[in-house]
Image (tube, rainbow, N blue to C red):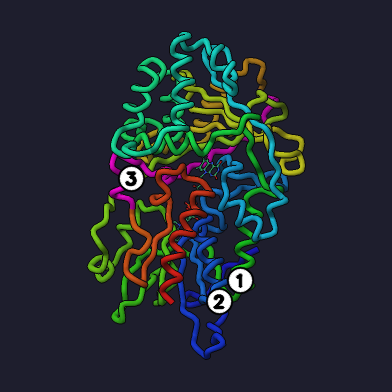
């Protein structure tokens, strides 16, 4: 397990001279999510003296975990896709690739008292919430979305694009719930390019959708990377928040944290874009290129349920009707093995909502009771005695709220030449934010860091 250090500045092993007698360059990485972990690992492997600074008490960021009955569970449902190449390559490098298991998974759509399976062309043809002509248009939209070029799609909204391809009714019933499942009530401005990319990330092969999970859960990945960083002489500092980032008199990044301050040769920021603005010191502000600092984020609330019985055969059931306070029911135990979860069944109820939404601050007990009551309407044979435990988790900065023309506002990898770098979720667009997206972005950012030897 990666340890935290009590020493404020430049903790960890002393910088070791390299074989030319030159001190390795010092790099601070801010944030211990998967992006920060990959940056710190690769830089430590390249001989840099790395300090990873993470505000919370654990590594893994949004893939972080909570303990229940001697096991760990992600606070927010997580799985891999066979198309997650850079993440799977990372796991190979860590010796974990064979620890990923794959299973066919299915999707359902709740309408009234019925859950319609939506996995094969035939399912779509039988999808009663839509008229027959609309079902055909939705099917054709899916095919077209996978085949057409992405050109021009950053400049029109997904609402316009999908409505044009499928028609208003089909958009409302079929596509809108999918946008809302990621952006909540902020879906209207999202560019078509984002949806196009989603079509292409999640396409299964002819055999249908397959998802993957790692034995031991996502905590295992974060811990192994953390341990590697420390074994390479790097320092992993938990419970330490960066409060200010500036440039010192020599133009070196100056990192002020809750425990002290230190200058480094380079810094890589991996925290969400929202909030970075507040931490920038005057010297750094002057050195920055023009940037859009107002990229807002959508937050999420998840209610994690441990059940004594399964709910449905589906990994994901969309619940778009307003009778449900959540947008989806994700039954991860349809993917995970008993060795990872015990005999219990694991379900996440999810709702993307902005941190300014009053529901984001709703009392956790009240919210979990309200959501449980709503779930029992969808599954009328569900009983209170079927519930082992429920827990609420919230994250304010999950999904950047993209608007048309986002490609022109996407923050660059190098913020101050040779000194200050960025690898965060505001950059993964148009791909869906994911561990794979953050690993891919980290690799791109590292190309900029590593040329500055
Ligand atoms: C509900 C939900 C479901 C998801 N499902 C999936 C899925 O199935 N598959 C998948 O691959 N991905 C999934 N994701 C997305 C995935 O978790 C994220 O895209 C990914 O974890 C982002 O990693 P990151 O390192 O870029 O950022 P983050 O995970 O946000 O890491 C940033 C880190 O910076 C730290 N930090 C912030 N401010 C400071 C500061 N001032 N000082 C020091 N540290 C700071 C934070 O504590 C955090 O650890 C899901 C996310 C959510 C919320």
Coordinates of residue 178 in the picture (x, y in percent): 46, 28
Q: What mark, if any, has residue 230 been given in the picture? A: 1
Mark 1 vs mark 2, foreground winner is 1
Quadrant of the image containing the N terminus: bottom right
Residue at the disc numbered 2: 12
Give yes or no for residue 301 being in the magenta stretch.
no
Q: Residue at x 60, y 45 (%)?
A: 74
Which residue corresponds to the image point at 39% horizontal and 51% vertical from the top-left? 427
Residue contact between numbered discs 1 and 2, judged by CB atoms under 8 Å? yes
Q: Residue 17 vs residue 283: left or right? A: right
The residue nearer to you, when weighing 387 against 90, is 90
How many other residues sit within 10 Å of disc 3, few (<14), some (14-19) or many (≥20)? some
Q: Position of residue 356 (x, y in %)?
A: 34, 39
Which stretch is magenta? Answer: 384-410
Crowding at mark 2 (Cα within 10 Å: few <14, some 14-19, many 20+)? many
Distance (Cα) linking label 1 and label 2: 8 Å
Q: Determine which residue is flagged by label 3.
A: 296
Q: Earlier in the sequence, mark 1 or mark 3?
A: 1
Quadrant housing residue 225: bottom right
Element marked by disc 1: helix
For residue 168, the mark is none
- 68, above or below 449, in the image: above
Check the image and report above or below for 225 versus 301. Answer: below
Q: Is residue 378 left or right of residue 253?
A: right
Q: CA distance from mark 2 to mark 3?
A: 35 Å
**Count of marks placed on residues:** 3
Identify the residue at the far bottom of this view. 21
Q: Where's residue 5, x and y in %?
A: 56, 71
């Amino acid at each position: 397990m990666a340890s935290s250090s009590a020493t404020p500045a430049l903790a960890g092993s002393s910088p070791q001279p390299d074989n030319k007698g030159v001190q390795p360059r010092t790099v601070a990485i801010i944030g211990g999510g998967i992006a920060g972990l990959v940056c710190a690992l690769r830089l430590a492997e390249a001989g840099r003296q790395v300090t990873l600074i993470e505000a919370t008490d654990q590594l893994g960021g949004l893939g972080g975990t909570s303990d229940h009955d001697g096991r760990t569970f992600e606070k927010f449902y997580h799985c891999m896709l066979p198309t997650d190449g850079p993440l799977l390559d990372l796991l190979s490098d860590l010796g974990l690739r064979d620890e990923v298991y794959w299973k066919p998974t299915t999707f359902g759509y709740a309408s009234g008292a019925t859950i319609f399976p939506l996995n094969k062309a035939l399912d779509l043809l039988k999808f009663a919430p839509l008229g027959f002509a609309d079902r055909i248009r939705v099917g054709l939209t899916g095919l077209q979305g996978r085949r057409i070029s992405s050109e021009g799609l950053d400049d029109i909204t997904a609402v316009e694009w999908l409505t044009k391809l499928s028609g208003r009714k089909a958009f409302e019933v079929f596509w809108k719930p999918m946008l809302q499942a990621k952006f909540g009530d902020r879906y209207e401005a999202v560019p078509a390019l984002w949806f196009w990319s989603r079509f292409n990330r999640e396409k299964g092969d002819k055999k249908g959708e397959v998802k993957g999970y790692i034995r031991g859960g996502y905590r295992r990945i974060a811990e192994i990377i953390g341990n590697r960083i420390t074994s390479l002489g790097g320092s992993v500092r938990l419970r330490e928040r960066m409060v200010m980032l500036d440039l010192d008199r020599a133009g070196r990044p100056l990192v002020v944290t809750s425990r002290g301050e230190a200058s480094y040769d380079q810094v890589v920021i991996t925290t969400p874009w929202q909030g970075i603005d507040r931490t920038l010191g005057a010297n750094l502000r002057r050195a920055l290129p023009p940037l859009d600092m107002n990229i807002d984020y959508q937050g999420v609330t998840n209610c994690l349920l441990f059940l004594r019985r399964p709910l449905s055969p589906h990994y994901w059931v969309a619940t778009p009707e307003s009778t449900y306070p959540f947008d989806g029911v994700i039954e991860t135990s349809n993917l995970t093995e008993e060795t990872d979860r015990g005999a219990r069944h694991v379900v996440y109820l999810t709702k993307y909502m902005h941190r300014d939404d009053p529901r984001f601050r709703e009392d956790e007990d009240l919210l979990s009771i309200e959501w449980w009551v709503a779930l029992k309407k969808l599954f009328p044979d569900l009983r209170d005695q079927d519930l082992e435990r429920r827990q609420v988790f919230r994250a304010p900065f999950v999904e950047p709220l993209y608007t048309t023309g986002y490609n022109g506002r996407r923050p660059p990898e190098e913020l101050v030449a040779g000194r200050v770098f960025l690898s965060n979720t505001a950059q993964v667009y148009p791909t869906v934010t994911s561990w794979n997206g953050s690993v891919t972005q980290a690799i791109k950012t590292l190309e900029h860091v590593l040329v500055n030897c």
